[in-house]
Amino acid sequence: MKNELQRDVERVSLTLNVNGERSQVLVPVHKTLLEVLREDMGLTGTKHGCELGECGTCTVLIDGRPELSCLVLPVQVEARAITTVEGLAVGSELHPLQQAFAELGAAQCGYCTPGILLASRALLDVNPKPTRDEIREALAGNLCRCTGYVKILQAVELASTRMSS
Amino acid sequence: MRVGESVRRPDGAAKVRGRFEYSSDLHAPDMLWGATVRSPHPYARIKAIDISAARAMPGVHVVLTHKDVTGRNLYGLEIKDQPVLAHDFVRYWGEAVALVAADHPEQARRAAQALKVDYEVLKPITDAEAALAPDAAKLHPNGNITRQVKIRHGDQSARADIVVTGEYEIGMQDQAPLGPESGLAVPEQDGSVELHIATQWLHVDQEQLAAVLGLPPEKVRLTMAGIGGAFGAREDLSMQAHACLLALEAGRPVKMSYSRTESFVGHVHRHPGRLWYEHGADRDGRLVYVKARILLDGGAYASSSTAVIANASCFSCGPYRVPSATIDGIVAYTNNPPCGAMRGFGSVQNCYAHEAQMDKLAAELKMDPVELRMRNALQTGDKLITGQTIDGPVPVAELLKSIAAMPLPASGEGKGGDVDLTKLPGGVSNTTHGEGVKRGVGYAIGFKNIGYSEGFKDYSTAKVRLFTKDGKARVEVHTAAAEVGQGLVTVQAQIAGTELGVNDVVVLDADTNVGSAGSSSASRQTYITGGAVKTASEAVRDRVIAMARAELRAPSGLHIENDNVVTGTGKLVVPLATLLGDEVIEETREFHPRQTFPLDAETGQADAHMQYAFAAHRAVVDVDAELGLLKVVELATAQDVGKAINPQAVEGQIEGGSAQGLGLAVMEEIQLKDGVIRNASFTDYLLPTILDMPPVRMDVLELGDPNSPYGLKGVGEPPTISSGPAIAAAVRAATGRPITRVPIRPHDLTL
């Protein structure tokens, strides 16, 4: 800590609204939302895969819309509602998407899963009964290297069916 | 939780909650961050290294070079030829030269940039053929041939009425696991180190680290951290030794976590290759001979090249009856990035070639390509080109029959000839109205070995512990096997649950406190570690039954079912928890599959492999030959898995493996120019997205191998072998173009 201060970096005090909780953080101004979530707030559920906005693993929701947290600076999103994977379940009750992903084996290594869950959640929030092509379009920015996407597609469909019945 | 059921992954809930701890999520109080200084040249002599500027940077605690490597500064899976930190030469772009540990990752990175290395730049060898030239510079003391495999089988002067030849080229594929390399090394007071790491093989990491650090193995302890995909990329050391050296020197925990760009130079890749083939057949389409020369570029260091070239050679002819074979497989050192293990391991490259050759032969004979393959299909009891008699199910004809019989997808045209433009190659960019689009259908089949080969000792260790917890029986399974996403934790629990009849089974974290499990590679873990868990569970069960018989004077024929000891007819004898009381029953067992033998140096003849697995694919592809675009419309596949221990996980392996094969066929390639990677990012190295992946039709056969636990066969790799070659065949069928190189590029379709 001492050495970082020696570098004389500009730190800002920010209030971030993450998963419905407001927290104050004092962070270097250049740190990305991804870094602040993972390193300063201990929310490591959000993953880093490329840190250049290419892979989608760091997807979070900002006011309900999917954003790549590696390309967002916390100052841009102060006072806005940030949702990470940790905020999907309600207590011990998994979100239907989480339930479906676990049930169908849509998470293998699971590294892309948090980002894909959030992108899917944003889709179902605005389009509760998407077609397969609409699901594909919504997830086109999220890479998965394990599953070949087949079970991911099925899991989103299953969650959609369950949520609308 | 029984064998054969689609049991849910025990780690699934944690993964969907974001609570599963990957190696990159680890944190220790007071930890430093490590960074690596890497070579900007593919080939250069190191004249001097000046660490002073880097050392003086704020926050920097340690700077290390080759002089600080406390043990042997060479490591490698097959040949110890790779320095932990380069000392005299750098042999590839991105090779590690020095290390920095600082308070913050950025400080470490900046210090790494400030470190000065004086290089004498040398002309790199960036082509495998050039490396073989007599006057080529020797990149390693024994020359530039890492290994040469010769297979001489049958009549070496065989002639045939029909002869087809071809030359094929395969690009360099990256495993691209989504979790970049990372780990945390924690030094202890006694001079030992604890490494938390995402690796495919804890014990071989431990063995290599002990040598590099100059420590006895017991002073290098490893615990598996969560793995974000592997596919071969985590078989070799990446940052393991670096983090340990930094932590031991600093006396503080050190975390290292690669960026995506660094990941591209931080692990080995799939070997690119050039393959020359000549197939001879009689007029009925029966193969008479195959001659091939297979040249793989191994890059700067050996990694597992020696085993990859053996596979590429052994499986060079595909799963066909080939009476005479003359195969020369060579893997060469160059100044390109090192190549090693990737899913499919040598069988992927050759499958493109042998399947293209079979199609050429079919065309020459005016025969249906599937019919030609069936006519030459390998069968149980046949001799392979290595002289080994293949046993167990060899369902080559059955798999081909299965994919050929599956219904074809509907044409892109809707009612009344309407075309959904978004379904055409190029998709939503709407660049065509379908004028130049042609559909092709292609077939391919491949095979490979399961488990280690050529006498390399293959075994795994499992400790199974049965005790009572909260009044109920519980089983703990402990192995060192890497769960890389494939579902091995589930399989271990299913096997212990099945053998012990207990419902509460917990698989402990893998670490080096239990014997080696071997690597999570070669599609071997369900077989080998599964076998070890089965054997150890049987030993525990035998003790329980003996205990029940001794204490209760119970009859023979007892077994355990649903947490109860029951008679042969299922009548309750005693609840397991009651029988056990405070007793803990623990057994550790090793499982060894049957032995294999090294290939003969002159003839390549040997019983070199333990088990063989087969998969076939049919691909339907739409090609816009005017715009150079293509779209894979559907993949259909059939695979014999012997016995599906977890059918859902098997499907997941087949779907995911097929997708990686698709990637190599149509988009994935590390682009090199003079030894420098030009596309070390996901912007420029393209991975299949959900839009690129077509629906998958699947037929999973369970034919039962009499030699393996439950009759199972390894599952993970076969789907990656034949999906790409089927796509290439479909593109040929659509366009009439030769398509001799993958990945297929737009100009291969248009120019």
Image (cartoon, rainbow, N blue to C red):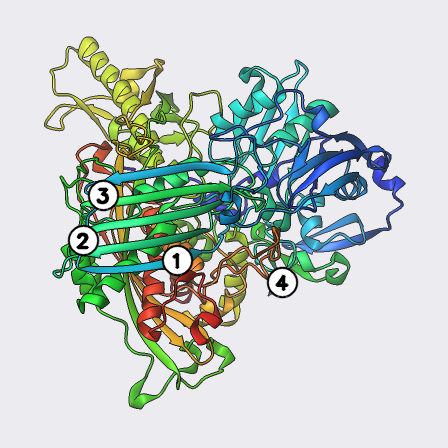
Q: What's the amino acid at mark 4?
A: Glu
How far across and down, in percent of the image, does residue B18 sit?
A: 54, 47
**Whether labels 4 and 2 share one chain:** no
Label 2's element? strand
The reply to whether callout 3 and callout 4 are in contact (CB within 8 Å) is no
Residue for badge 2: B287
Which of B621 and B746 lies nearest the eye of the viewer?
B746
Decide which of tag 2 and tag 3 comes sooner along the chain: 3
Identify the subunit bearing mark 1.
B
Residue at 65% of width from left, 35% of height from top?
B27
Q: What's the amino acid at mark 1?
A: Tyr
User: In the rendered view, does A127 fall on the left or right side of A50?
Assistant: left
Q: What's the amino acid at mark 2?
A: Leu
Measure how far apart labels 2 and 1 are at the Cα level. Answer: 20 Å
Identify the subunit bearing mark 4.
A
Residue for badge 1: B168
Label 1's element? strand
Residue for badge 3: B156
Observer-side mark, 3 or 4, equals: 3
